[in-house]
């Protein structure tokens, strides 16, 4: 999944709403992956979801 800031043009009026939606998806993914973070793939996905969440939070603010 691409970082949130690359989804839409910077002047897009719906960008904050899109970022909030992406935050929900990323948080859900992070929580699910945390259950099996002993697997390298799950840990990597969890960390990537957390990073995307932080990026989207900057846009949603």
Image (cartoon, rainbow, N blue to C red):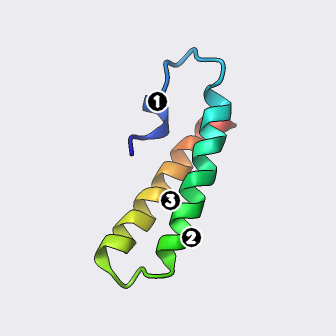
Mark 3, secondary structure of its residue: helix
Q: CA distance from mark 3 to mark 2?
A: 9 Å
User: Residue shown at 46%/30% (left/top)?
Assistant: 7
Q: Quadrant of residue 6?
A: top left
Query: Where is residue 27 drawn, in percent x and y?
Result: 59, 59
User: Residue shown at 41%/58% (left/top)?
Assistant: 48
Task: Write down the residue under mark 1.
Answer: 7
Q: Is residue 56 visible?
A: yes
Mark 1, secondary structure of its residue: loop
Q: Is residue 26 above or below residue 33?
A: above
Looking at marks 3 and 2 on the same chain, the residue that comes earlier in the sequence is marked by 2
Looking at marks 3 and 1 on the same chain, the residue that comes earlier in the sequence is marked by 1
Q: Is residue 57 visible?
A: no
Q: Quadrant of residue 28?
A: bottom right
Q: Which of these two is toward me, 12 or 54?
A: 12
Q: Is residue 34 above or below residue 3?
A: below
User: Residue shown at 66%/42% (left/top)?
Assistant: 20
Task: Write down the residue under mark 2.
Answer: 31
Q: Is residue 13 left or right of residue 1?
A: right
Outermost residue, left side: 40
Q: Is residue 47 left or right of residue 13?
A: left
Question: 10 Å neighbourhood of mark 2: few (<14), some, or many (≥20)?
Answer: some
Query: Where is residue 39 drawn, in percent x and y?
Result: 33, 81
Q: CA distance from mark 3 to mark 1?
A: 17 Å
User: Residue shown at 35%/67% (left/top)?
Assistant: 44
Query: Where is residue 53 drawn, in percent x and y?
Result: 55, 51
Q: CA distance from mark 2 to mark 1?
A: 23 Å
Q: Is residue 11 above or below residue 45?
A: above
Mark 2, secondary structure of its residue: helix
Question: 10 Å neighbourhood of mark 1: few (<14), some, or many (≥20)?
Answer: few
Asked whether disc 3 touches disc 1, contact meaning CB atoms under 8 Å apart, the reply is: no
């Amino acid at each position: 999944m691409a970082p949130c800031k690359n989804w839409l043009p910077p002047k897009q009026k719906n960008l904050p709403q899109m970022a909030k939606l992406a935050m929900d998806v990323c948080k859900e993914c992070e929580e699910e992956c945390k259950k099996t973070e002993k697997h390298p793939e799950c840990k990597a996905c969890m960390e990537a979801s957390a990073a995307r969440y932080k990026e989207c939070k900057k846009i949603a603010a």
